[in-house]
Image: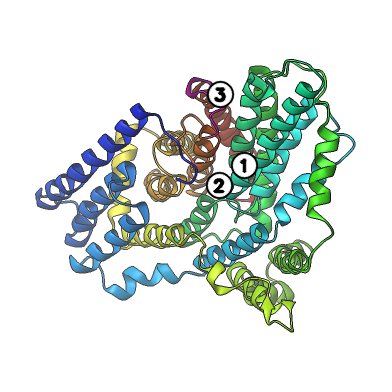
Amino acid sequence: MPGEALSPSEERFERWRRDIGLLAGPVVFIIIYFIPIPSLSKEAHTLAAVLGLVLIFWLSEAIPIPATAILGAILNVILGVALAKEVFAPFADPIVFLFIGSFILAEAITLHGLDKRFAFAIFSIKFVGESPYRVLFACGLIAATVSMWVSNTAATAMMLPITLGVLHAMDEIHREAGRVSNIRGSSYATGMMLIIAYGASVGGIATPIGTPPNLIGIGLIQSLAGLKITFFEWMIFALPLTMIMFVLLYLVILFLHPPRMIKLEGMRGYVELAQARLGTWKIGEINTAVAFSAAVFLWIFPSIVSMFYGKDSGISKFLSGRFDEGVVAVMAAVLLFILPLSWKEKKFTITWERAVKIDWGTILLFGGGLSLGKLMFSTGLAEVIGKGLTEVTGASSLWGITAIATFMAIVVSETTSNTASANMVIPIMIALANGADVSPIPPALGACLGASFGFMLPVSTPPNAIVYGSGLVPILRMVRAGIVFDILGFLIIVGGLMLLCPLMGWV
């Protein structure tokens, strides 16, 4: 993971986890493959063996997670579960292009420093000033807001040097005034680190492109449950949950890591200096802002039109059909290759060499997960799993299954990536809901959102690893705060789904 810094004991655990997974995966595959299961067709039986191998490799990260997704697809073709055309078709799903386009947009935002300009614009607001309480709030708010549009990893990586710079500047100012100062080594500094990591994770759920599990959930729900959730509908549903969770996040961090100073002297001067270094808006920032604004407008506008004219109106069908979210994303990305930095020098807003640095692993993981999910339903494996889980758990109510889905996703995401967690848990929960004859949408959304709420450990999510690597976050403090946020996240997700899903017509 980027920026990850693990202790020797954690490194030993990671090696042990991978070694065990590398052995256990093939063993589980062989056991399932050769044990007779009369209730399954030949294709479903083979898929169950492949699924066992893939899940163990995803949990243990025995090989890179995206490589496991590809391995699953390869095995399904070679072992006769389905033809190559059927297995690999999900890798070209329109949502894959939403991933690609939004990742390139995020790359341009980072390349031209648009995220930093936004961050210092927030810090410069008079209300923030030099209050340690408001500076803490602003740090979390910036991380959450940026993470709505770029990956939570990129948002945290952007905020880390800014936040460390703030802490360092405060210490320097105190020392120059002849006062003993160790703000950087204080509990408050730990709180600053945690709020940018957790804020980025919370902010990521607010938009479909904020974090990969959102798009994975949207794709699987559309593919396996037949419901298309638009960009605007997702924001109407997820933004209130994000706001509630962020307020609770701030209050808990403030309680666990209260500031010991009344004023962060010199904060205003530090921000003014940083803004002066940024200078006036450059052409690359303007071009990126234009492409990004166009994408956001076209993502949201069709849904707004549908609210006024109805989804079945001619204009609504025209806009939703012509301006699919994936098409809009790649259109905005292509615009970056057209808008010039300099006509004379033939320089454009982004180069292909920079664009290809996007996270292709997540794209392959999404395709592999969607492929497995579709095959589970087409072979009948999902129906058997759903009925079996219903009998074992005794869960038959919609909200009971939703609670199980949310809890399982949170627990799994503590030990593996949020993308792998979403790919594993969502199809199983849809199958469980179908087996219990209840709507699969709330359980799928519970698993989707829960996958982003791994707060306890450095290995739970890249933002955690990044701030842990700063050396300012003792592991026990992260675990303590993480347990609190896992519990709060579970309650907010389940409660929010119970309130919002009926209002959205998703039950």
Q: Residue at x 64, y 75 (%)?
A: 331
Query: Is residue 123 within the magenta segment?
Result: no
Q: Amino acid at mark 2?
A: Thr
Compared with residue 223, is residue 442 higher up or lower down, i.e. above or below?
A: above
Q: CA distance from mark 3 to mark 1?
A: 15 Å
Front position in the image: 464 or 9: 9
Q: Quadrant of residue 269?
A: top right
Q: Is there a contact, CB below 8 Å, between mark 1 and mark 2? A: yes
The residue that label 1 is drawn on is 200
Q: Secondary structure at mark 1?
A: helix
Disc 3 designates what residue?
481
Q: Amino acid at mark 1?
A: Ala
Q: Residues within 10 Å of mark 1 (few under 14, many from 20)?
A: many
Residue 490, given in percent of the width and then of the height, sits at 54, 31
Helix, strand or loop under label 3: helix
Residue at image point 62% right, 59% down: 106
Q: Are marks 3 and 2 in contact (CB under 8 Å)?
A: no
The x, y position of residue 212, in whole percent, is: 52, 53
Percent x, y of residue 131? 82, 26
Q: What type is the residue that disc 3 sits on?
A: Ala
Residue 45 occupies which quadrant of the picture? Answer: bottom left
Q: Who comes first in sequence, dot 3 or dot 1?
A: 1
Q: Which residue is mark 2?
A: 153
Question: 176 or 432, which is in the foreground?
Answer: 176
Q: Is residue 381 above or below residue 360?
A: above
Q: Is residue 205 visible?
A: no
Residue 1 placement: quadrant: top left
Name the one closer to the observer, 410 or 318: 410
Q: Does label 3 or label 2 sit earlier along the sequence?
A: 2
Q: Relative to residue 121, is residue 50 drawn left or right?
A: left
Q: Which residues are magenta?
A: 470-477
